[in-house]
Each structure stands twice: as C-alpha cells, then as structure tokens.
Amino acid sequence: MKAILLVATGMMFVAGVDAAPSTQVAWTPATLDFVEKGDAGRGKALSAPCAGCHDGTGTNPSLSGQLPTYLYRQLQDYKNGNRQDPTTIMNTMASALRDQDMADLAAWYGQQAPMRGAGGASDATGIAGRGEGRRMEPPCSSCHGGAGQGEKVDTPRLAGQSAAYLEATLLAYKSGQRANDIYSRMRLIAVKLSDAEIRQLADYYSRLK
C-alpha cells in the first residue's frame, strides 16, 4: 500500500509540472540522420564559448564523450524553453544557434574522450544496479547502462561527471525545476529518492571510470 501511495504521489507531483510537452524534438529517422552527420570540425570552432563552463567541475557538466543525440536535444530544449537554466545563460546562448550549429557542436563533443572517475565506486543504495522494488524504482542501469555510459537514443552518460552536477540535476528533477525528461520518467524516479540517496548515487556515478 505504501508503494502505491508513493507512486500516486509521484504522479500527482508530475501532473503539476507537466502541463506542456517536455520537448519538441521528435526522433524521426531524418532527425537521427541529421544529428549523425554533424560536422565535428565546424563544431570545434563553435565550441570556444562553451569551454569556460563545461570543464566538468562543480555543477557544470562535462560535455566530452556525451551522446550527440542527447546534446542536440538539450540545446533544442534550451532554445525552445522546454529546459530552463536558472541563470538563463544556456537559454540565451542556445537561442542564437541554428539546428546545424547544434548538430555540429554535438558531433564535436561526442568525439572527445569522456571524463573518467577516480575509481572506488560503490553502489551504496543498490538503486543504480538493482533498483528498489518496494518503491517501484527501476535500476538506473536499465537506461544509463551498466557502466553509466549512456544509451541511445538520448539517455546521457553519467560516468565521470562531477558529483555536484549529478546531485544538482537529480534535485532539480525531484523539485520539478527541470522538466524536459520524456514521459516524466526522471521526475517520477527522483521524487521518490531521499536527498541522502541522491548524494550517494551522485558519488557512485562520479567515481565510475
């Protein structure tokens, strides 16, 4: 009964923040092909303004080695307003990008060596690898891969990201501040996690190599 109540609470929470579509990107064969053909050389030239923030420290994510499809959709979501940056910096920067610019940036970053954690990762909660049936929490690995490597089409790589960024992201999903997850899946998961579990999961993925 408690599990049912928790799920119902999560659904009520999401209903309040999910009045609009979470994204305007539809992964048609044409869109996938467009992103796959992004020009990494041009993306490198476009990436200069990004480097100052996206070094993988603090609450700013590393973009290196991230799935191009994920990066492309996030830029589109920032431009369209489906994802809001509290500082508005990303929304402002993305508003000036064309679709081709986004595909090229995604291609460049997707070709770079990903961040690597320091090692010693321990799945203290068990949720990353096994999930938690009592609360109907699926394992993180079912979407993000057994090594946190991310999965197509646009489920992001988590391994090696800073713990501060991962924690801030999960808390944003939990509060509904971030709402561009398709089918509200991350909000439904995060709302059932305690803040301590979020910190443990963030530490685990940050340490993965």
Image (spheres, helix red, strand yellow):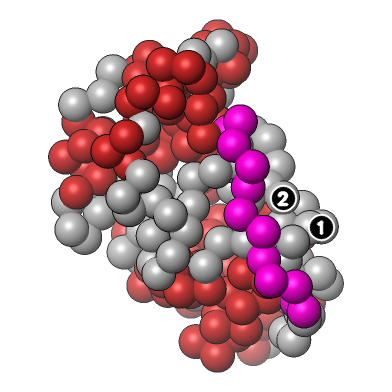
- Reply above or below: 204 against 53: below
Tell me which corner region of the image, top left, top right, bottom left or bottom right, holds residue 138: bottom right
Q: Which residues are magenta?
A: 110-121
Tell me which corner region of the image, top left, top right, bottom left or bottom right, holds residue 99: top left
The residue under the point 62% across, 83% down is: 200
Q: Position of residue 54 (x, y in %)?
A: 39, 51
Question: Magenta residues: mostly which secondary structure?
Answer: loop
Residue 161 left/right relative to 96: right
The residue under the point 28% across, 18% down is: 98
**CA gap, disc 2 and disc 1:** 7 Å
The residue under the point 36% across, 44% down is: 51
| Residue occupied by mark 1 | 146
Q: Which mark is residue 149?
A: 2
| Amino acid found under the numbered disc labelled 1 | Gly
- Asked if the residues shown at circle 2 and circle 1 are in contact, with their CB atoms under 8 angstroms apart, the answer is yes
Residue 92 left/right relative to 171: left
Q: Quadrant of the C terminus?
A: bottom right
Q: Residues within 10 Å of mark 1 (few under 14, many from 20)?
A: some
Asked whether 29 or 40 is in front, the reply is 40
Q: Which mark is residue 67?
A: none
| Amino acid found under the numbered disc labelled 2 | Gln
The answer to whether residue 112 is magenta is: yes
Q: Position of residue 43 (x, y in %)?
A: 42, 23
Q: Quadrant of the N terminus?
A: bottom right
